[in-house]
Amino acid sequence: MKMMGEFVKGLWRENPTFRIVLGLCPTLAVSTSVSNGIGMGAAATFVLVGSNIFVSLVRNIVPEKVRIPCFIVIIATFVTIADLFMKAYAPMLSRSLGMFVPLIVVNCIVLGRAEAFSSKEPPIRSILDALGMGIGFTWALMLISAIRESLGSGTILGFTISRSFEPPLFMILAPGALLTIGILIALINYLTVKWKASGSAGSPSGAKQGG
Amino acid sequence: MSQMVKFGLTLGVICLAATLVLAVTYEVTKPRIDAAMKAEEEAALKTIIPEADFFKSGMAGDIEYFEALKGSALIGYCIKVTGSGYGGYMRIIVGIDTLGAIKGVRILENQETPGLGSKINEVRPGENEPYFLKQFKGKNAAAVAVNKDIDAITGATISSKAVTDAINRTVTEFMKKVNPPRKSTEEGASDFSSMGLH
């Protein structure tokens, strides 16, 4: 695959949240407001890129049977570095992210990409893959939190958008998260199938038209 | 056997490298983090009791507190409170006047659920302090309780109670240890004994 392809795939075709369906635990918990979503996405992207560089660098040294603990140590180290530096040099940001930063250690996207990609590919490709996945994760978070925050709190980024209805509280609780993500995945699956069908409608191999 | 040694060694070396990196990062960031925490505390003290010129720190047993002084007169106390919320510990500062009425509450650190428990520290747009903490002003710190004085936040009962009970508990203990001079700072304010505390 061409270099840019490694980056672009994480944005849509292999979007970690909607297509590969990874890292749903923090996504469900964190997407209660757009600012939370952006913050989590940014921090997760930093950890993704940083830890995947090192996983790729040590990929030939680490024996297969101890790779998981080794990767986890690398990831947790990066998360802690990010947390400490944020507390020291950007205390306002650290305060608004709060608990999210340590939670990145358990984000399946980070270990998932380390295991599926960086442990087998050279560093430059690993960086591009991590960046694409991180940005894909971030926009997915923003979309989900925009829906949940506007319906569940009546606000977006803290700004009240409507006072004309009493926001259903369940939208910012677990059921709202599951509903929103489930419906979004169904919608994206539907669109993907539809676009693939209309894309091959003009192919010479005689694929069925219309339908 | 040599396989196990190889595994252990690789993992050990990576852990060692990680420990070194983290130890260095910790030491490098510690002064700034400590300074940031102190600055945050000092800023909080000023917002809780703005009339004070000077804060003198002191210890009452385990409780760390600051005397709020205007000139040479004691006008109140800022007490550091630690509580246990839904998600973990909380660091709170509560300011009281010499009669034990709350002047203000600031939550410096909490690990409550983002979007729910974290609302204890949420500031509504256009306002300048968290709406939940505004309720504490004027209440008797050593007897403050949810439902009686404070409305809990919907969906964040445990967090709301944690803040309230931590303040109640710590100030009660503080009062026993420090026994502040019962001088009223306002005309016509009743003193402690009529509050039924002692």
Image (cartoon, rainbow, N blue to C red):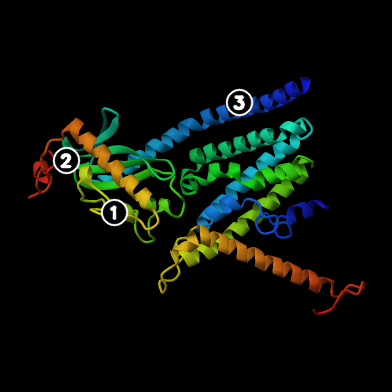
Residue B150, image x, y percentages: 27, 53
Q: Residue at x 15, y 42 (%)?
A: B99
Q: CA distance from mark 1 to mark 3?
A: 45 Å
Q: Chain of mark 1?
A: B
The amino acid beneath tag 1 is Lys
Q: Is A7 placed left or right of B18 in the picture?
A: right
Q: Secondary structure at mark 1?
A: helix
Q: Which residue is mark 3?
A: B20
Q: Residues within 10 Å of mark 2 (few under 14, many from 20)?
A: many
Residue B105, image x, y percentages: 30, 46
Q: Which residue is mark 2?
A: B98
Q: CA distance from mark 2 to mark 1?
A: 19 Å
> Can residue A143 be seen in this snapshot?
no
> Can residue A120 be seen in this snapshot?
yes
Q: Residues within 10 Å of mark 1 (few under 14, many from 20)?
A: some
The amino acid beneath tag 2 is Thr
Q: Which residue is mark 1?
A: B134
